[in-house]
Image (tube, grey):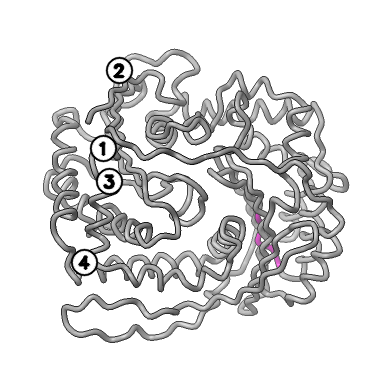
Amino acid sequence: MKLGIYRAAFLAAASLAAVIAPAASAAPGAVAALSPVKAEVPVEYHKLANGLKVVISPDRSVPTATIGVYYGIGFRLEPRNRTGFAHLFEHMMFQGSKNLGKAEFIGLVNANGGVLNGSTRFDFTNYYQAIPSNTTETFLWAEADRMKGLAITQENLTNQQGVVKNEVKVNVLNQPYGGFPWLDLPQLANTNWYNAHNFYGDLKEIDAATLGDVQQFFDEYYAPNNAVLVVAGDVNPAQVMGWVERYFGPIPASRNLQFPDISEPRQTQEKRAVKTDALAPQPALAWAYHVPPKNTPEWAAMRLIDLMLIQGADSRLTKVLVNEKGYTGNVSGGINWPLGSPYDYNGPMLWSGTLIHGADVTDDAILADVDAVVKDLQDNLVSATELNRAKTKARSELYDTLGDGYRFGLVNLLASFALFDDDPGRINRLEAEIGQVTPELIRKTAREYLRPTNRTIISLKPGAAAPSGEAAAVPTATTTATK
């Protein structure tokens, strides 16, 4: 789903703009809460009259800046009968604007030794670049130029329809395990069309997009009142706000900003399906559970459950399925996996797991071992040692994200919290949220959200090819719901 990265010589690495405090000591065997603030990220938050949210995070450690523009439109919010439209539009944004011709935005970044990228996710489409800080004004102007005046032409649309269709063919239709399970699980586990459609796009619907569709989509969703601008790095906040007011301030807000209901009912029956993949050399298995609502104590507990069960060589499922039983060499998964982080979405979400295994082991045998691991978490309180190790993992992952050399991870969190929660400062409370989780809350959350009736399972079998044009979904599957 990501546009290919355009790289040039960019000799810089941003350091973590944080003050690291020592961890609080705890009595032996006690479950120690993480101290309330470990990494303090500078955050300035503003809003323009046209609705644009602006987040600035100054960091003078190296002379670089990272600019991100996040639009609150992702693939689960795209119009009916236009699957893949959000992703198609991501490509359109690189086709030129009023003052920058086709590919000139990319060329401008490359000429200044920068790095850029863009991606489409469940709830947003983003565009970002890391550049020398002395060019910050230039790229604020460039982002504003395409926000207010994208080059929407039939030539550009036709060209990008071909690009996107080829991407679908390469990444899904002609790829072993293409779309498995990241495209398949949401379509089977969810019941609301907006969460359950093929978001990479049906080839016929990609072809059916018209110039009028593109213009309407741009006018409605690519507007300042549906966007967040983040500037992080070696910048002067007051100077940045002056530029932002100058270049983004005159852009009019959308007058027709409407979003569908994306809520999901509580799942009450297990769902199972079988998918046939002619290109796959071995069978595979995937499962998913709906996670608790975001920003709740149960969600924080689910984040730690994810770390305990599937993340890292010391995780429970890795120990059992890889080390003890030898079913596979790797178990992958997570919350919002593999399309994002546990934090950068805004709606119903799945915790999923997957593995490729030999033909000599049945899916039921694997699931029995998964169930045994889950049941232990539901029946017994997790030890202080294991819970603290999971909290340390969470803290380590957060620091890795904030310390990314291009600041993309930092920008992503700031933009997500501003876009979805109107609260970019939450980035400095993440450790406290995780630190408050107790063994009792872990058990309670496992009992409610890891129940079999909240689970979806897909078995992938090597075999005959699926009908043409349908391999991007689960249409070859036989689905049964069991209590």
Q: Secondary structure at mark 2?
A: loop
Residue 125 position (above or below residue 274): below
For marks 3 and 4, give the one nearer the viewer: 4
Q: CA distance from mark 2 to mark 4?
A: 41 Å
* Badge 1: residue crowd in 10 Å (few <14, some 14–19, many ≥20): some
Q: CA distance from mark 4 to mark 1?
A: 27 Å
Q: Position of residue 163 (x, y in %)?
A: 64, 30
Q: Which residue is mark 1?
A: 453
The residue closer to the viewer here, 374 or 207, is 374
Does label 3 or label 1 sit earlier along the sequence?
Answer: 3
Q: Which residue is mark 2?
A: 463
Does label 2 or label 4 sit earlier along the sequence?
Answer: 4
Is 237 left, or right, of 396 in this rendering? right
Which residues are the magenta region? 128-132
Q: Secondary structure at mark 1?
A: helix
In this orientation, does residue 326 appear?
Answer: yes
